[in-house]
């Protein structure tokens, strides 16, 4: 069947390897998308070290999406090998698409490409995690065949009422 010629106004989407120049745009998009509004998720806080460290350690599993050559999204992943386990896992740690390009398939294309890279690296399963109330992400991941949701409960304790904390922070006596 003859291919329909693309209209000149149709945006050109590309999924490519991460490059050092992508680190600043990734960080700034992540700052807008992953706001730390709960203390219990501080262990997964977005900061500049996230893209820098993954770029340093797991560049092969970090991808960028562009629209007409301009940065438009990222997928940052890594491989997990457990001691005493024959299995290798792929972990999609962070996925983000510029809101103005949402719902145009960029996220899907990055996830599909990342899954192929995980498979090539020997992974048998890919893991993701997201906040329980992130309905968009949950719909997105379900659409891509992710299931077996496991709830994880985060607890917090205020240490400022502990005697040891009070002793440590007691104001020095004035006399
Ligand atoms: C989740 C996210 C990456 C999706 O990227 P995207 O490029 O917009 O996704 P796609 O266009 O490939 O969407 C694929 C499918 O996911 C689902 N989906 C995506 N956005 C959705 C939305 N706002 N509401 C409901 N379903 C949605 C749909 O099934 C969609 O298919 P359809 O458009 O044919 O109905 C993007 O919304 C995002 O950056 N969110 C903020 C960051 C985040 O939560 N990241 C995930 C956890 S790290």
Image: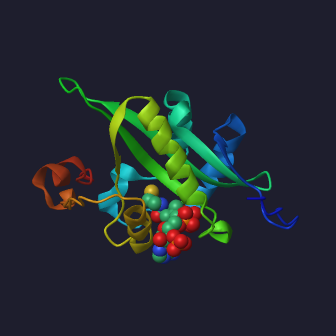
Q: Nearer the viewer, residue 141 or 134?
A: 141
Count of labels shown? 0
Does residue 33 appear in the picture of this structure?
no
Residue 21, relative to residue 33: is it above or below?
A: above
Residue 91 position by quadrant: top left
**Residue furthest top in the image:** 84
Q: Which residue lies furthest to the front in this view?
A: 1
> Residue 104, how many percent across, how many down?
63, 67
Determine the image quadrant of residue 11: bottom right
| Residue appearing at x 38%, y 39% in the figure | 90
Task: Looking at the picture, tell me which residue is in the foreground, 2 or 82.
Answer: 2
Left or right of residue 106, residue 66 in this image: right
| Residue sitting at x 23%, y 26% | 86
Q: Where is residue 59 in the image (x, y as percent from the top left)?
A: 55, 32
Residue 26, horizontal then vertical, whole percent? 62, 50
Left or right, 118 with reference to 66 = left
């Amino acid at each position: 069947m003859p291919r329909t010629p693309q209209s000149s106004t149709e945006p050109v989407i590309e999924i490519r390897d991460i490059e050092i120049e992508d680190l600043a745009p990734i960080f700034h998009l992540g700052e807008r998308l992953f706001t730390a509004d709960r203390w219990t998720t501080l262990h997964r806080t977005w900061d500049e070290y996230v893209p820098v460290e993954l770029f340093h350690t797991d560049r092969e599993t970090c991808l960028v999406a562009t629209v007409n050559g301009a940065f438009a999204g990222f997928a940052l992943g890594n491989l997990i090998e457990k001691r005493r386990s024959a299995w290798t896992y792929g972990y999609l740690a962070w996925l983000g698409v510029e809101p103005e390009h949402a719902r145009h398939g960029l996220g899907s294309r990055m996830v599909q490409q990342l899954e192929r890279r995980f498979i090539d690296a020997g992974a048998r399963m890919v893991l993701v995690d997201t906040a329980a109330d992130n309905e968009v992400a949950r719909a997105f991941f379900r659409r891509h065949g992710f299931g077996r949701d496991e709830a994880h409960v985060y607890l917090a304790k205020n240490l400022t009422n502990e005697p040891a904390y009070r002793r440590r922070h007691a104001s020095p006596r004035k006399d």
